[in-house]
Image: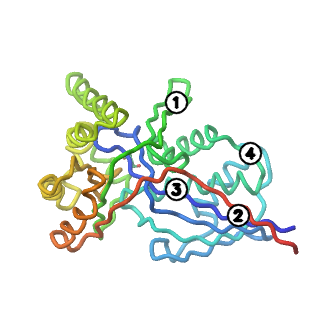
């Protein structure tokens, strides 16, 4: 019997405004891998969203799979991995987190590690450096995470999100490292208290499905958006236009430059059609919330 694996990982948005480095939401845009065992490692990219030039040694899926195998003290067998992606790179839609989650799942499958969901999101969040995109890609739905002083990750997640989202994807990239460089090294006490109160309100509103209020607090971030706004093309204009067209709120998706609007489900299709001619250089899409997280199908064939 020869085994092959189809692995599907959702992309994600992070922060939703003040939920900086903590809140993630899985989106119905996917990274897909077809994995077969062979002697040497090999990748094939079949998507405009995946780089044409790469080396196996520096490929994030490979480096993460190798790191996970080493952590569990097992040998990582050679694999051929054929990848397709709906996630544009460096746009704030969690493409690198989805590659990290894919690497963990590859090691999990080909090394038969039987990792739990908790092990997967803990590993993915450690490798990514924060739990927002990574845990959303593992669990699906809405995730809220925080690390304890001992390094353990506490995560609350729910698939019950009764709202719609639309993304405005510009045709420019913004690397997360660049978008993090503009953030202040520390915040004044009163400022931090205010920023944290806004994040608390966002979280409470999302979990009680008070989406009107969630949208309001998406637009009241003090942790990162005031410092990143200048890096995001048409940031103020999109927020205002989206609000006028019925969005509850609009925030930078992750580190940007994509921005994401929260809307009532019944309004999203008309909203997207209205926005397209107003921002013609953007790829504007209604995106559904992914509720499954990383998925694996195993195929067994007789040699
Ligand atoms: N929370 C992260 C940020 C998401 O805003 O920088 C991108 O990794």
Nearer the observer, disc 1 or disc 2?
Answer: 2
Q: Pointer 2 and pointer 3: residues touching (CB < 8 Å)?
A: no
| N-term mark: 2 or 3 | 2
Residue that mark 3 sits on: 98
Gap in angstroms between the C-alphas marked 2 and 3: 17 Å
Q: Where is residue 32 in the image (x, y as percent from the top left)?
A: 57, 66
* Identity of the residue drawn at 24% across and 43% down: 215
* Identity of the residue drawn at 46% across and 46% down: 141
Q: Residue 195 sits in which quadrant?
A: top left
Instruction: Check disc 4: other Cα within 10 Å, few if <14, some if 14-19, many if 20+.
Output: few
> Which dot marks residue 154?
1
Residue that mark 4 sits on: 114
| Residue in the foreground of this view, choosing between 36 and 291 | 291
- Rendered view: 83 above or below 133: below
| N-term mark: 1 or 4 | 4
State which quarter of the image contains the C terminus: bottom right
Residue that mark 2 sits on: 5
* Identity of the residue drawn at 32% across and 54% down: 165
Local SS, label 2: strand
Gap in angstroms between the C-alphas marked 1 and 4: 21 Å
| N-term mark: 1 or 3 | 3
Local SS, label 3: helix
| N-term mark: 4 or 2 | 2
- Rendered view: 269 above or below 124: below
Instruction: Check disc 2: other Cα within 10 Å, few if <14, some if 14-19, many if 20+.
Output: many
> Which dot marks residue 37?
none
| N-term mark: 1 or 2 | 2
């Amino acid at each position: 019997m020869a085994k092959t694996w189809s692995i599907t990982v959702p992309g994600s948005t992070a922060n939703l405004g003040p939920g900086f480095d903590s809140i993630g939401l899985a989106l119905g845009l996917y990274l897909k891998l077809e994995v077969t065992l062979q002697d040497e490692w090999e990748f094939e990219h079949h998507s405009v969203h995946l780089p044409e030039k790469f080396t196996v040694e520096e490929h994030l899926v490979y480096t993460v799979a190798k790191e996970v195998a080493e952590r569990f003290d097992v040998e990582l067998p050679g694999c051929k991995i054929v990848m397709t992606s709906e996630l544009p790179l460096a746009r704030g839609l969690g493409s690198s987190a989805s590659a990290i989650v894919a690497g963990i799942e590859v090691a999990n499958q080909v090394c038969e590690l039987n990792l739990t969901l908790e092990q997967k999101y803990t590993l993915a969040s450690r490798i990514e450096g924060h739990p927002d995109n990574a845990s959303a890609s593992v669990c699906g739905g809405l995730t809220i995470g925080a690390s304890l002083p001992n390094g353990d990750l506490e995560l609350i997640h729910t698939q019950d999100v009764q709202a719609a989202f639309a993304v405005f994807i510009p045709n420019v990239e913004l690397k997360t490292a660049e978008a993090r460089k503009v953030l202040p090294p520390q915040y004044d006490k009163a400022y931090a208290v205010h920023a944290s109160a806004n994040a608390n309100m966002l979280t409470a509103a999302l979990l009680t499905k008070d989406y009107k209020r969630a949208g309001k607090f998406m637009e009241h971030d003090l942790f990162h958006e005031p410092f990143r706004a200048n890096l995001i093309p048409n940031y103020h204009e999109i927020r205002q236009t989206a609000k006028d067209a019925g969005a509850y709120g609009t925030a930078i998706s992750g580190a940007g430059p994509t921005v994401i609007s929260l809307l009532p489900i019944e309004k999203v299709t008309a909203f997207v059609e209205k926005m397209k001619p107003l921002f013609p250089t953007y790829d504007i899409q209604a995106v559904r919330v992914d509720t499954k997280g990383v998925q694996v199908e195993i195929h067994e064939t007789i040699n």
